[in-house]
Image (cartoon, rainbow, N blue to C red):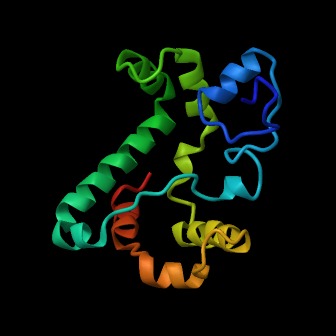
Amino acid sequence: MFTEGKIDAFLGFPPEPQELRARKIGHVIFSIAADRPWSQYFCCMLLGDRDYVRKYPVATRRVLRAILRATDLCATEPVRVAQSLVDGGFTPRYDYALQTLNDVKYDNWREYDAEDTIRFYALRLHEAGLIKLSPQKIIADGTDWRFLNELKRELKG
């Protein structure tokens, strides 16, 4: 719809922005990977069902550890990861995969504040009327940082 002029903007995820740039269509209004204040927060977060996490804490920790190690691999070996994404059939374009891996700040997960990220995005959603709960209520009732904090100590970079 964007390329046909039916909409003025859209939220794009790789490889859409790269494909449009290659065709010289449109321009980036803002990038959550590069522009403040968005770039100062996590772009993605892992959610777990409360009952599952309570029942299977070891499995939960293993999943989170694997994701964080994969995140470190994306930061330290983007060439290898990009090739793996192509070889695995997740994307056909090595150059787009590598660009995305280099654009995203995978190595910042130890420095970013997960609670502050929830607060930031919840406040935006609350202001827009998309959620009713306050950021404080969401953080108090819906977050548990124990696994992340423990793995930050364990996986020191």
Q: Is residue 26 left or right of residue 97?
A: right
Near-viewer residue (131 or 157): 131
Q: Position of residue 55 (x, y in %)?
A: 16, 71
Give the quarter of the image for residue 148. Answer: bottom left
Near-viewer residue (153 or 2): 2
Q: Position of residue 56 (x, y in %)?
A: 17, 66
For image coordinates 48% across by 57% down, the residue present is 45
Q: Quadrant of the N terminus?
A: top right
Figure label count: 0
**Which residue extends farthest front?**
6
For image coordinates 73% across by 43% down, the residue present is 31
For image coordinates 42% across by 37% down, the residue present is 73
Give the quarter of the image for residue 121. Answer: bottom right
Give the quarter of the image for residue 98. Answer: top right
On screen, residue 104 above or below 81: below
On screen, residue 82 above or below 147: above
For image coordinates 59% across by 31% down, the residue present is 14
Q: Is residue 70 left or right of residue 115?
A: left
Q: Position of residue 22 (x, y in %)?
A: 73, 16
On screen, residue 74 above or below 46: above
Q: Is residue 153 left or right of residue 43?
A: left
Q: Is residue 150 left or right of residue 101?
A: left
Q: Position of residue 13 (x, y in %)?
A: 61, 36
